[in-house]
Image (cartoon, rainbow, N blue to C red):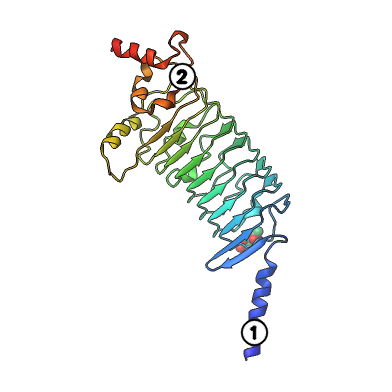
Amino acid sequence: MERLLLCLALFSMASYAMLCPKRCTCQNLLPSYTVLCAKTGLLFVPPNIDRQTAELRLMDNFITTLRHQDFANMSSLIHLTLSRNTISQIQPYAFADLQDLHALHLDANRLTVLDDTHLQGLVNLRHLILSNNQLHSISDGAFQDFLETLEDLDLSYNNLVDVPWDTIAMLASVNTLSLDHNLIEFVPEGIFSNLHKLARLDMTSNKLKKIPPDPLFLRIPVYAKMKGSPLTALVLSFGGNPLHCNCELVWLRRLTREDDLETCASPRDLAEPAHGFLLCVLLI
Ligand SMILES: *[C@@H]1O[C@H](CO)[C@@H](O)[C@H](O)[C@H]1NC(C)=O
């Protein structure tokens, strides 16, 4: 009997080991099963990954395409890292079975476009990291399945001229929004007004000439006065934009740190921001 049990134990260990893809490291730290295949020269997602995997790390490889079968039936996957590959294509519904996924890291790849099908099915997504790609277009429905759950959206270092603002305005749980180092020219007025959990908004180094007032920004002085309050202050970063320093920007000048506005791109005779704002104060 003892021998039979031992045989069974060995057999089950062997069958588990067989599910670990070549050159990868697999850890079965119950209840979570982790597959680590970083820097292993992979050209595609290995087909024989255990479907019960909770954490899958595939960073620093040469994967170019994500296909639906790559992540099919991985309904226990919580964390997926695909950073620093050469991914330029995500096939429609590639992530459709990942209903438990909390974090998706796709930074430092070659993505150019996100449409409604690419991220569909990620109904529990909290962290979406898409920095350092070549994104120039994101459809209005691209984030539709995680509007309520998303806490952290990083779209920094892309080629975005336009952002799906109406979608951004619906990210009810968003805490950190990184849109810095893009080519954004325009922010619609009041677009952040329903983002009650927003704590960090980074719009550094874009092409903004003006920033319309937003009810969200009124929180800053209120929070600053309530010392020791559990609510954290909103951190806004708008430096590195060719801001036109007219009276429309006085509100921002009052609210943000001095160093954040740096210099104004125009008007030229008021390039020293303090003078421009002084003039506004006199006019009011
Ligand atoms: C996923 O599950 C379905 C239904 O159980 C099965 O037919 C299919 O082969 C599975 N696919 C993979 C890649 O495991």
Q: Earlier in the sequence, mark 1 or mark 2?
A: 1
**Which numbered circle lies on residue 131?**
none
Give the position of the N terminus as an image quadrant: bottom right
Front residue of 234 and 122: 234
Q: Residue at x 60, y 47 (%)?
A: 93
Mark 1 lies on a secondary structure that is helix
Q: Residue furthest left?
A: 226
Residue 190's image quarter?
Answer: top left
Percent x, y of residue 31? 52, 67
Residue 6 circle label = 1
Camera-side residue of 160 and 98: 160
Mark 2 lies within 8 Å of ligand 1 (Cβ measured)? no
**Residue at 69% across / 57% down in the picture?**
47
Image quadrant occupied by the C terminus: top left
Name above or below for residue 41 compared with residue 108. Answer: below
Q: Is residue 76 left or right of residue 70?
A: left
The residue singled out by tag 2 in the image is 263
Tell me which amino acid carries mark 2.
Thr
Which three-letter amino acid code belongs to the residue tagged 1?
Leu
Judged by depth in the image, the label closer to the viewer, 1 or 2, is 2
Place of residue 177 in the rendered image (x, y in percent of width and height, measured from the top left): 46, 37
- Report if residue 81 is visible in the image: yes
Quadrant where ligand 1 appears: bottom right
Q: Quadrant of residue 53?
A: bottom right
